[in-house]
Image (cartoon, rainbow, N blue to C red):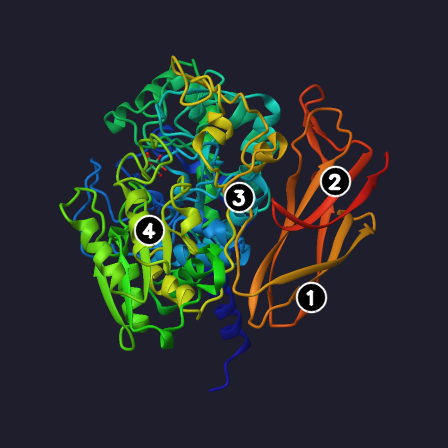
Amino acid sequence: MKSSPLAGFILVLAFASRLNSTAAASPIYEDAAAPLETRVEDLLSRLTLEEKIAIVHADSKFTTAAIPRLGMPRRWLDDGPHGVREDIGPDTWNAAGRTDDFSTAMPAGICLAATWNPDLGFSEGEAIGQEARARGKDIMLGPGVNILRTPLCGRNFEYLGEDPWLSGAMCTGYIRGEQSQDISSCVKHFALNNQEFERGTINVEVDERALREIYLPAFQAAVQQGGVWSVMGAYNQLRGQHCCENDYLLNKILKEEWGFKGLVMSDWDGAHDTRECALNGLDLEMGTEKKYEDYYLAQPYLNLIKAGELPAAGLDEKVRRNLRVMFATHVFDAGRKTGSLNTAAHQAVARRVAEEGIVLLKNEGGTLPLEVAKLKTIAVIGENATRLHAHGGDSSGIKAFYEINPFAGIVSRVGKKVNVIYSEGYAKDGGADLAERAVAAAKAADAVIYIGGLNHDKGFDCEGADRKDMKLPYDQNELIRKIVAANPKTIVVLEGTMVEMDAWLDKVPALVQAWYPGMEGGNALAGVLFGDVNPSGKLPATFPKMLADSPAHASGNAPGNYPGTNGTVTYAEGLLVGYRWYDTKHIEPQFPFGFGLSYTTFEYANLKLIPGDGSNALVTAQFDLKNTGNRAGAEVAQLYVHEQNPALPRPEKELKGFKKVFLQPGETRTVAIPLNRGAFSYYDPARKSWVAQPDVFEIEAGSSAGDIRLHDQFTLAGK
Ligand code: GLC
């Protein structure tokens, strides 16, 4: 039927009016196509004072309240850096006892750091982000980037090691990956949370250069390179003010200097005072040990605003930051990513991170990889061969779908061709003849794989307490000595963080550091031990020969340096953390920062320093890297900078770039690592700014902090 012009006109009119009415009914903040700031302001304008208060504090252990009339759902937060934690009961720390809250357990943070592979950081963050969305979460509480200042910190396993540049590079990749899944990461714990001893109250005294050059850069990278949307304040105090309500840290540095636009949340029960929280930069209060309505940013805050003692504009700014994160993660938008759980891809990431994070520390006489054809019996000894770790460590623990322990991984890999016998060797609860039985097993085998180290029991690698020393527990030193005496072909595998090993290291032909390798750890370790995987991990922290060699414990160390006295800990070593200390003080470590062996070898040659084109890079270090062995492998080429005549004291050298390069046998690749002005700069407290002064700089390319292969000089001219 031919429609008349009038009919057409009526049709257009009807559509236009519907459009108008629809437009009138759907506010701007619901329009996913509208600019983010426009949506923020529109929604902010619609909130009542009480609703604004509801947004800036928790209404259960891990949630904030919904605002149904505006279509704002309940917001779910959850731990942690290694995967999505099991659900916790609404108002206690007890598990909720659900059966649908399993997740993929990635290797511990220190293992991810040991990969020195930011792309893998992205993959891990992406996978965790997908699992978080599948579990209905909005903000994930990780990564943890606190610098490893002392080997004794109970949470070193969760973090990314001793160097700010490596920690910054690894957390940036992770955050970008996780936030690509419509989830906000939450970098933590800002800042100076470098020990668990008295963590809730300890006051950290640290000089400004160490703060700026060592303890803050990874957080700055998270904000400025990673684009992180949330930051968690630390429990401790900095210079007498709690970090969750610290004007200098939160307002001056994070928000004003760094331009952070997201939200700052407290650590759980890390808030302490309404006015301090209101005025010093806290935007979301979590976990306070009070009734929710009595939280510092709840009724008490509302009362002070209504009494005109605190500005309502301050609340608006907090709400603005919370809303920004909601819109950035598409909380209101159809089509928000829905994620996935425990996929083959996630399992593959967990395995890859473990494979690339395991560090080969010693391998004499080609002991490794083990050749199955030459073995009839392998003795696997040690409690950690069968012990599961993923669920441990406290808040970063994961209820994993499964966990392949080292023994299971070894049996799965070679059990059909070799007789694999197991002996516990040691147990935390002791055991009468465990050692004797282990020695007998060692004697009966062609090779021994000893799996020991630490675990997530409190007082070892666990949140809430520090280690009391760096020793191997459960008399493992004596056990290892007996086992290697019974069978010289003994490979020692250590799980956990660094320990003293002088009691047996010279007697053991091969040593592998496996950290906490996650749910696929046993398969990854077996891959390394039997040669399917060529290890490429490098230490993200120095392994000192003994605790007294390390900066926070240096001989003559006043207890005030660690763990602190009368509630204050003083970082007397200043900038000299990790290799910065050992290099500058000429103390030989057991294994240096950045160290890790391969089943092949690499050669560095032809270092050229190519002046920048005036853009970002001042100079680019270019050199050839060759795989001089007979099997494919990856080398992490590191670039360190040393200033010859610094105006202020500087460490012997500092990591300012690295590249992980995968090479076939005989292959040579030209590696180029750009250095911008920041690579030459130090923080000058007098000028309150970073300074790169004209000087001669030594540019050093190497395989570890203790193995510099090439060096050349670069003169930084005046402006
Ligand atoms: C814990 C931890 C923090 C964690 C939070 C929630 O005390 O310090 O890392 O994210 O509380 O579990």
Circle 3 residues within 10 Å: few <14, some 14–19, many ≥20: many
| Badge 4 residue CB within 8 Å of ligand 1 | no
115 vs 339, nearest the viewer: 115
Task: Establish if 423 lies above or below 320.
Answer: below
Q: CA distance from mark 2 to mark 1?
A: 26 Å
SS at badge 2: helix
Percent across and percent down for residue 429 are: 17, 42
Percent across and percent down for residue 384 are: 27, 52
Circle 2 residues within 10 Å: few <14, some 14–19, many ≥20: some
- Identify the residue position indicated by label 2 in the image: 677
Q: CA distance from mark 1 to mark 4?
A: 39 Å
Mark in the foreground, 1 or 3 = 1
- Identify the residue position indicated by label 3 in the image: 167
Mark in the foreground, 1 or 4 = 1
Mark in the foreground, 4 or 2 = 2
Does residue 192 appear left or right of residue 516 in this picture?
Answer: right
SS at badge 4: loop
Amino acid type at image mark 1: Arg
Task: Establish if 570 lies above or below 481.
Answer: above
Amino acid type at image mark 3: Ser
Residue at the far front in the pictured view: 485
Q: CA distance from mark 3 to mark 4?
A: 21 Å
**Residue 84: mark:** 4
Task: Establish if 296 lies above or below 494.
Answer: above
Mark toward the start of the polypeptide (4 vs 2): 4
| Tag 2 and tag 3, C-beta contact below 8 Å | no
Amino acid type at image mark 2: Arg
Mark toward the start of the polypeptide (3 vs 4): 4
SS at badge 3: helix
Residue at the far left in the pictured view: 432
Percent across and percent down for residue 493 are: 37, 54
